């Protein structure tokens, strides 16, 4: 086991090196000159030269990469060129916001998707089924930005129930925090709810036709307990896995949704950084994301081994 | 039946959650301002964005300010005297002014602030104060700026960030991190900032003009999407928004709870033509007749009506027709397609003249480009619009990778700030590589002359040259559009679009 772990950790190193080179090169493929972007409207040549020097933009790309890696290895992701705040601080500030949003979105998706899937499977061929399918089709095909603006129009402008944008941390005011995130969370969760609904429906249909369900009915169990106690449990296993996979989608979906609702999260951080050519922030955020992703993969691998002894080499 | 009950229960639960979240009303003790972008660093020396200037106007007072008619008025200074040769400027400071940390704003502090702008690494103010050789302290409330050469626009520079005073104690302690917790001498002091979310200020109790400050707290909220910004204003989550879209004007006027405030902008919207850097040597770069033809093909009023609901001001110079330096001897010429065609013929170019037309990405920018394209086509131009992301346009422009570059310049209050850096040979923003020794000389004279009448005469000559050479075709001047709730009183629209918070009241 220890052997396996050591091997996997050693394998991580080339992956991370590759990722870091990829991030760095992709970033430099972005059109435009960061020094010019940072120099502002006046574009004073002296200022531009000073910026190039300060951030080593006057050196070749491999040299710039070496500077960056050296800093990263010493735990310094650099600071935002635009606002002079350390990148790590920015990440620590933004990540919880997006995680809160993602968690709420998943809850909303589960609350809508699974009951809708079960209902449409149980009531197959009825108006309930068509209604749920229509909802799923709508959920998958509705663009985030459109739904976001419509929700703002309805709940903020017409009804005045919810704030149109912004974010309040839960530690400050839980109610205001929920109020400020429920619309973006719904927009994010909506598409996933639709996917979950479809999968729940097909899984339920399969299970409902299986022998043990027939047996359960034959025993004279109520329909309610057949569905909720017997069928649903088995049908939900693949659905839960799918829900977990959709978490990745959530983080990328947050990019657009956060922009619409002005939620100061991870997605907004990276979009603004790209537009402002804030290289240090883009590099830092992508590197952290990649590292988290790779680590999660490692943990998953290890978990498989723990669960399934046959995989231990 | 059971499922129906289940559904009803779910619906009821959802509704109760909504009600629980609803009516999350906030007390109106705070002025909430919606910004179009998140500002950059809040250090007057290192800041460079327009949106940052909006925030500074509550935080950092300047030596001078402007009024609604672009006159320069005292703020932290009481006034100034220029020496006969124009190379020395003596500035008298307002007495009993304190910074937010309680430090006095005296001549030493003013000297420190100006020197910080002039020498700090990465300072964006260096070029604005390039004419200053050194600063002397004459007495505790008087400083003298000793100039290298006469420079008429200097006093105008001191109405903006170059004239902002920072607390020497705080600035020395914080170094280049000063902007994370700025300490100035404005009506409000810094409380906190959450990047991309909010900037919070509170009333400064020892402000020199505190009797005219009525709002306790200001929160700036960057909301990029203009539709969402307006939605927030309508729903009451904001009290004021900047940069309203012209297409939303009707909507604001129709709403009894909202007030639209307009002011003519000091900038311009124009077409920079590549004359000296066009590698393909297209017809526009070769003959002023072709450029004049393009100019004559454009109906400025039609653009104004189609894209901006008639709210903007058509123009043909680098300052708008309402500006004191507008040259009435050169009024707007009406569209004349026949003359444009004749000019193209005279120039001997083959029509249609193909034009690589670069425009930054954005609804309004692209709409203007399309209207120009359609109009110019009638005169014999085949405009190929190339939409480029804003941050990339700088590089493309500097590399000369365009034939026409449609840009908007936010404007400076002195006419020099709208002309020299774009039109003088080798100037940093002269992307089209325009060079005319006579125009160069006039622009230099404009900088050396402080007498308004003489200066105006100099710029009149220059306007004649520029309107003939057409290195930039000026099209119109924006109207600054700010919308606020009717609860906000005392808002004065200013030609620089910056929100002056002194005097504002919330009902």
Image (tube, coloured by chain):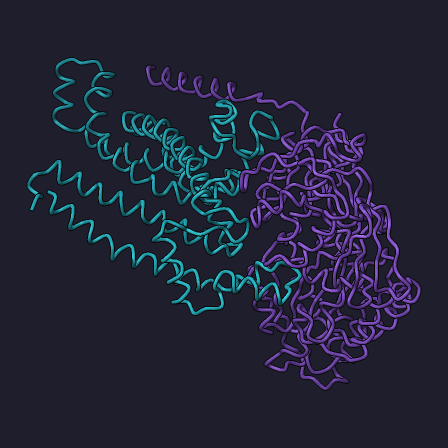
Q: Quadrant of residue B492?
A: top right
Which residue is located at x 80 percent, y 59 percent? B414
Percent from the top left, x then y, of residue A304? Answer: 15, 40
Which residue is located at x 34 percent, y 18 percent? B3
Residue B469 vertical placement versus B506 (above, below): below
Task: Judge whether residue A154 can be spotted in this image.
Answer: yes
Provide the letter of the chain coloured cyan. Answer: A
**Foreground pick, B133 / A3:** B133
Q: Going by the picture, which residue comes out furthest to the front?
A: B139
* Left or right position of A283 against A300: right
Task: Judge whether residue B244 can be spotted in this image.
Answer: no
Percent from the top left, x then y, of residue B439? Answer: 80, 75
Residue B497 vertical placement versus B300 (above, below): above
Percent from the top left, x then y, of residue A211? Answer: 12, 26
Which residue is located at x 57 percent, y 38 percent? B193
* Left or right position of A53 against A43: left
Colour chain B appears in: purple
* Left or right position of B306 against A205: right
**Foreground pick, A125 / B2:** B2
């Amino acid at each position: 086991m220890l052997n396996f772990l050591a091997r996997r950790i050693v394998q991580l190193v080339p992956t991370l090196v590759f990722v870091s080179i990829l991030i760095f090169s992709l970033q430099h493929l972005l059109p435009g000159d960061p020094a010019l972007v940072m120099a502002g409207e006046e574009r004073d040549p002296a200022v531009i030269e000073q910026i190039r020097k300060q951030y080593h933009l006057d050196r070749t790309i491999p040299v710039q990469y070496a500077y960056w890696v050296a800093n990263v290895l010493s735990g310094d992701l650099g600071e935002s060129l635009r606002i002079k705040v350390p990148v790590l601080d920015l990440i620590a500030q933004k990540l919880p916001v997006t995680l809160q949003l993602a968690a709420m979105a998943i809850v909303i998706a589960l609350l809508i998707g699974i009951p809708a899937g079960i209902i449409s499977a149980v009531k197959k061929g009825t108006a309930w089924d068509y209604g749920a399918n229509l909802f799923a089709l709508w959920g998958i095909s509705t663009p985030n930005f459109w739904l976001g603006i419509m929700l703002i129009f309805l709940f903020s402008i017409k009804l005045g129930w919810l704030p149109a944008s912004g974010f309040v941390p839960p530690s400050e005011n839980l109610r205001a925090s929920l109020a400020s995130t429920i619309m973006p969370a719904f927009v994010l969760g909506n598409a996933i709810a639709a996917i979950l609904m479809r999968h729940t429906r097909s899984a339920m249909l399969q299970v409902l036709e299986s022998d043990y369900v027939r047996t359960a009915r034959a025993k004279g169990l109520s329909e309610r307990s057949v569905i909720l106690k017997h069928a649903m449990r088995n049908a939900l296993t693949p659905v839960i896995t799918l829900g977990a996979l959709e978490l990745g989608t959530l983080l990328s979906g947050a990019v657009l949704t956060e922009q619409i609702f002005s939620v100061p999260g991870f997605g907004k951080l990276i979009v603004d950084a790209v537009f402002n050519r804030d290289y240090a922030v883009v590099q830092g955020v992508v590197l952290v994301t990649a590292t988290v992703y790779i680590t999660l993969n490692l943990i998953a691998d290890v978990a498989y081994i723990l669960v399934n002894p046959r995989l231990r080499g | 039946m059971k499922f129906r009950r289940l559904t009803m229960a779910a619906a009821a639960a959802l509704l109760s959650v909504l009600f629980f979240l609803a009516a999350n009303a906030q007390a109106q003790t705070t002025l909430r301002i919606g910004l179009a972008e998140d500002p950059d660093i809040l250090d007057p020396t290192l800041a460079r964005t327009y949106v940052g200037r909006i925030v500074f106007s509550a935080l950092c007072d300047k030596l001078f300010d402007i009024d609604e008619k672009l006159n320069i008025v005292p703020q932290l200074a009481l006034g100034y005297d220029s020496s006969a040769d124009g190379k020395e400027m003596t500035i008298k400071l307002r007495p009993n002014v304190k910074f937010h940390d309680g430090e006095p704003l005296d001549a030493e502090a003013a000297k420190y602030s100006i020197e910080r702008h002039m020498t700090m690494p990465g300072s964006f103010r260096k070029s604005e104060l390039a004419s200053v050789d050194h600063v002397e302290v004459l007495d505790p409330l008087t400083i003298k700026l000793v100039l290298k050469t006469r420079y008429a626009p200097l006093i105008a520079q001191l109405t903006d960030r170059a004239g902002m005073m920072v607390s020497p104690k705080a600035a020395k302690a914080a170094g280049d991190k000063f902007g994370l917790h700025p300490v100035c001498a404005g009506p409000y002091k810094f409380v906190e900032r959450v990047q991309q979310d909010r900037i919070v200020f509170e009333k400064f109790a020892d402000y020199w003009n505190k009797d005219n400050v009525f709002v306790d707290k200001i929160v700036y909220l960057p909301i990029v999407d203009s539709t969402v910004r307006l939605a927030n204003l309508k729903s009451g989550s904001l009290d004021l928004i900047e940069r309203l879209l012209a297409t939303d004007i009707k909507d604001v006027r129709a709403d009894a709870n909202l007030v639209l405030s307009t002011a003519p902008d000091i900038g311009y919207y124009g077409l920079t033509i590549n004359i000296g850097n066009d590698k393909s040597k297209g017809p526009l770069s070769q003959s002023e007749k072709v450029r004049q033809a393009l100019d004559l093909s454009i109906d400025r009023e039609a653009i104004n009506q189609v894209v901006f609901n008639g709210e903007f001001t058509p123009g043909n110079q680098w300052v708008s027709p309402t500006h004191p330096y507008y040259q009435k001897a050169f009024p707007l010429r009406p569209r004349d397609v026949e003359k444009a065609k004749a000019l193209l013929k005279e120039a001997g170019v083959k029509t249609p003249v193909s034009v690589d037309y670069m425009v930054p990405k954005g609804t309004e920018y692209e709409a203007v480009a399309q209207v120009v394209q359609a109009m110019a086509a009638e005169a014999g131009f085949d405009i190929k619009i190339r939409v480029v992301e804003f941050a990339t346009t700088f590089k493309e422009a500097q590399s000369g990778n365009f034939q026409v570059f449609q840009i908007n310049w936010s404007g400076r209050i002195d006419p020099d700030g709208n002309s020299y850096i774009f039109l003088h040979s080798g100037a940093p923003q002269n992307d089209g590589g325009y060079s005319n020794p006579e125009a160069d000389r006039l622009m230099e004279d404009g900088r050396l002359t402080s007498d308004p009448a003489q200066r105006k005469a100099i710029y009149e000559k220059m306007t004649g040259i520029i309107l003939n050479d057409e290195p930039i075709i000026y099209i119109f001047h924006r109207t600054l559009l700010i919308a606020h709730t009717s609860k906000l009183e005392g808002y004065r629209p200013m030609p620089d679009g910056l929100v002056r918070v002194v005097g504002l009241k919330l009902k």
